[in-house]
Amino acid sequence: MKWIANISRILIGIVFVFSGFVKGVDPLGTAYRLEDYFIAFNWEFFIPLALFFSILLCTVEFVTGVMLLLNVQMKFTSWLLLIMMAFFTVLTLNDALYNPVPDCGCFGDAIKLTNWQTFYKNLLILPLAMLVFVYRKKFIPLTSSGRQWLIALFFIGMFGSFSYMCYSHLPVIDFTEWKTGNKLYPENPKPVNYYLTYKNKQSGEQKEYLSPNYPFNDSIWMAQWEFVSQRVEDPNTYYGKSLIISDTTGNNATESIIRNLDYQLIINSYDLTTADKEAFKQLNDFCAKAYNDNIATAVLVSAEPSDIAQFSKENNLQLDFYTADDIVLKSIVRSNPGVLLMKDGVILKKWHHNDIPDYEDFKKELGTR
């Protein structure tokens, strides 16, 4: 059984290292998911600490995996592992049964699992964790106890710093659909299929029709059947389907911005009240120079027109504002504000507001593309 315990230790270590890394490389995205939990459980007072808990959780998970792989402080590590697995198994069972959050994000944006799949995953790992716990005293360390703690402290400091760097700039690996190189509209779009379900008012029978192949012109049929639901099948494979851009008067401006054949700068801010105002002022000057070079700019925010007007006035901004869903804006660039450069629907580059380039350097980079 000891070799099985060792295999279990290594397998769990790999899972924990991977899980901790893919969340820790995107601490802001993990913080958003923690905020969803805080709201679901009426713990809104924890929301200001979401980023701290995000980095702490990812670091603990990653370092626990490393300690398992390196056979470091196994008595302590096995206790920590068992407690974590027991907690997350119960939590994900609650997620699966009651669906308080749609996506627990156990593997960040790298691998998407349903709540039931996440629970089953934990259900498989829990017995292995229990086996590691039972054999915790039989794992032979490779070095002294003091050196083992130094190894643990090194990885805590290293990964915690790495995760904070990914927050202060941008994730070194982007697992979202908005990563550079992705195109936001299909080249040769196929028709989208709309399926309509109708129910017979007398018999309760339900039938699904591919629109417009149903007798909508038959007044007798329409009197006997009532609309129930609609589902959409989009055969096109492309990114950014969730992005809908409106101008300040409510008109849809998505196509004109996304399909711009020339360079298109997009500045996103999911919350103007918490946005870095100095960064906006810097971007105001940056965009003015871009305008003189015929580079279009669109600022995507989630705010009412009156709030946009007040924000512009207070910060003396001359920018073209549009509105979009705040959840989508949080994903586009992990920064508030963030900057994205596109051309013909392809994402070319992204910047955190801490890394806004000098405009002349930006122009030189465009000349190399």
Image (cartoon, grey):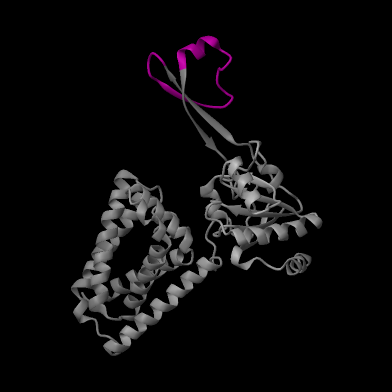
- Give the residue drawn at x 29%, y 54%: 91
Inspect this view and state whether residue 123 appears. no
Q: Residue furthest front?
A: 314
- 320 sits to left or right of 208: right
Find residue 177 and report its horizontal and vertical position in percent. Answer: 56, 55
Please say if 31 is above or below 139.
above
Towards the viewer: 83 or 223: 83
Residue 18 vertical placement versus 151 (above, below): above
Q: Which residues are magenta?
A: 201-225
| Residue 146 image position (x, y, % from top left) | 29, 88
* Residue 239 percent coordinates (x, y): 59, 50
Say if the magenta span includes residue 313: no
Q: Residue at x 62, y 56 (%)?
A: 182
**Residue 207 placed where, x, y %?**
45, 24
For residue 157, above or below residue 24: below
Q: Tell me: 211 left or right of 108.
A: right
Q: Residue at x 24, y 65 (%)?
A: 83
Q: Is residue 219 magenta?
A: yes
